[in-house]
Amino acid sequence: MVKVTRKRASGGQGINPLNPRFVMVTDIFLPPLAKQRQATENHPHTGESTMPHITANGISIHYETHGEGPPLLFLHGLGSSLQDWAPQITPFASRFRVITMDLRGHGESEKPPGPYSIALLAQDAGALIEKITPDPAHVVGLSMGGAVALHLGLEYGHLLQSIVVTNMSAMVPVETFTQRYAYYGRLLFSAFFGPGAVGKHIARSVFPGPEMGGLRKAMAERWAKNPRRPYLASLDALKNWTLMERLREITVPALLIHSEHDYSPLSHKKEMAARMQRATLMTLPDTHHVVNMEAPASFNSLVMNFLSDQEAQR
């Protein structure tokens, strides 16, 4: 049983989701998380897959496809790659054509000079959808990938069936002293020590349990592969980004997922659900920012139920 939140939050003060320091709660009953926390390297892909590059929106984009069925695109977060979705491949490829992609500046996709913007990343993803599938796609995004999913819902709704936005606010203000300290602190740390050092630091926050060593290692290794300039351009794309005032324009069904210990605030997500026309907000307890890797069974169940409902209504 899941508790669904559709309540408008009071206020609207922005908290920078780049700073992992916030805890919110709600109720949900799902399988125990301790049995779910496994390193992504222990989730093998099954079935046939393809791993091509395609030119879309003027750049070479690396993507993978698995399975057959309605198209389902997964979008990773800042500093990572499509490898983050390993725990989702097998469960979803049994019912969907799973598509994962490396965002511009990440993984094996092209890394042109900046500036980057969330709107530009959405253009890339929209161009990929148009090129590889004739059917509208479901889109699941985590963190910065969730911001891209929101932009897709706003500007490319004709290409979509639904969106799932995981642990991402619709605004990233860098205005107050605390927000500027968090943002410019990461910017300088990244510039001097590289994305790998940032990833290692963040991994300790998002995978804090002693049993999560494999997840921390995997995250640190992925972040270490990022060249500095594309990473910094991607980080800059989030600075003062917002869609909060335009959420009403998103007409596709949306599932908003909040982890209890995420560092983007629950109040933002309540505000998002209240502003959007067809949004449902759900919370996963005792989880952190990269919940699809930390608690794949709970995450997969939540997303699968939502997508199955959307498919049943077609």
Image (cartoon, rainbow, N blue to C red):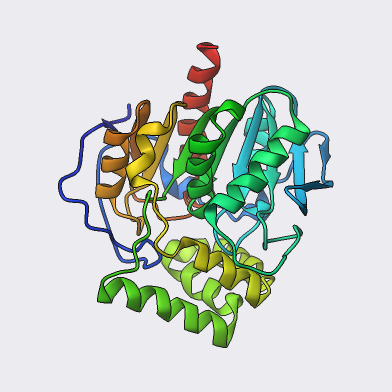
Horizontally, residue 196 falls left or right of residue 210, namely right
| Snapshot quadrant of residue 88 | top right
The residue at the point 57 percent across, 64 percent down is 234
**Residue furthest out toward the left:** 10
The residue at the point 59 percent across, 75 percent down is 195
- Of 157 and 20, the residue lying toward us: 157
- Of 117 and 67, the residue lying toward us: 117
- Of 72 and 286, the residue lying toward us: 72
Residue 86 position in % (x across, y down): 66, 47
The residue at the point 69 percent across, 71 percent down is 225
Residue 264 position in % (x across, y down): 35, 56
Horizontally, residue 287 falls left or right of residue 77, namely left
Residue 29 visible here: no
Establish if 232 lies above or below 305.
Answer: below
Residue 84 position in % (x across, y down): 62, 53
Q: Quadrant of the C terminus?
A: top right
**Residue furthest out toward the top:** 313
The residue at the point 48 percent across, 75 percent down is 201
Residue 289 position in % (x across, y down): 43, 55
Establish if 66 lies above or below 198.
Answer: above
- Of 274 and 241, the residue lying toward us: 241
Residue 258 visible here: yes
